[in-house]
Amino acid sequence: MLKYIFILPSLLALLASCSKENNTSTPDEHEPGGETEEKFEIVNIDFEGKSALIEEVIDVKPNLTYSNKTNSTQKILIDPRPIYEKSTFVPDDRKTYTLVDSVKLISVPLQIDNSDISLGEKKWNYSVQESTSLTALDFKDSVEVAPKKHLSASLSVIYTKIKTPYTLTIKNIKNDNLVRINGVWIGVYPVRTKSSINISDL
């Protein structure tokens, strides 16, 4: 009978050890002490025209050359594409917020005249990375080159660059708390082209 008394405590210790191993679990973010990621949605965005900075940017394209060795006049297309519009949001606070509607399209300033802002169509995402979009403006041109003549053309695209403060309001979807993010928006738009054409003998 004595040997059973010593065996029983050993057996109970072994069973307790197995029970602890089976009950071991990884902490879940929804359990007390776990972290739940906060998520937000965009409420609105406001731009301040009074502090806007506007400048002209010139993009010089590669020269175009053509030699007409035929006996007939040739029509040569001058096409500066691709030409892009650009949008970048630079927040003052570098804290990262998770937006559930990050693909939501918003309008940004297209023109600013005496602090009055004209917004463009809703086609941009709120992104701290530079966003680009092919312009819908058509800057193509053409020139006729007579027989035995040489064409040399230089072309530049003129852009308007806008820097203006903005305030983005977002809402915590869990508790409806509002957060306002201040920063600077930078936009670049093509407005016109400038060309210089020279035709000489071959």
Image (tube, rainbow, N blue to C red):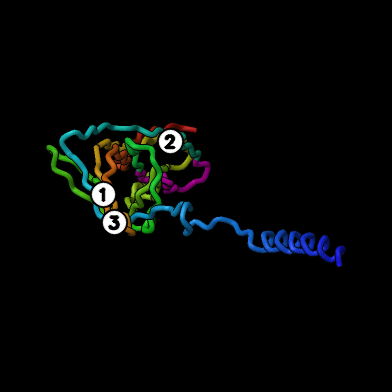
| Amino acid beneath label 3 | Lys
- Label 3: how many Cα within 10 Å (few below 14, some 14–19, many 20+): few
Q: Is residue 65 left or right of residue 7?
A: left
Secondary structure type for disc 3: loop
Q: Is residue 78 visible?
A: no
Which label number is shown at residue 61? 2
Label 2 secondary element: strand
Q: Nearer the viewer, mark 3 or mark 1?
A: 1
Magenta stretch holds residue 77: yes
Residue at mark 3 = 122
> Which residue type carries mark 2?
Lys
Residue denoted by label 1: 169
Q: Disc 1 marks which amino acid?
A: Thr
Image coordinates for residue 89, horizontal then vertical, percent: 34, 42
Crowding at label 2, few (<14), some or many (≥20) Cα neighbours within 10 Å? few
Instruction: Classify 59 as above or below 42.
Output: above
Region of the chain picked out in magenta, as a range: 68-87
Dot in front, 2 or 3: 3
Which of the two residues, 21 or 3, is positioned nearer the viewer here?
3
Identified at 34% across, 37% down, the residue is 93
**Mark 1 or mark 2: which comes first in sequence?**
2
Nearer to the camera, 89 or 58: 89
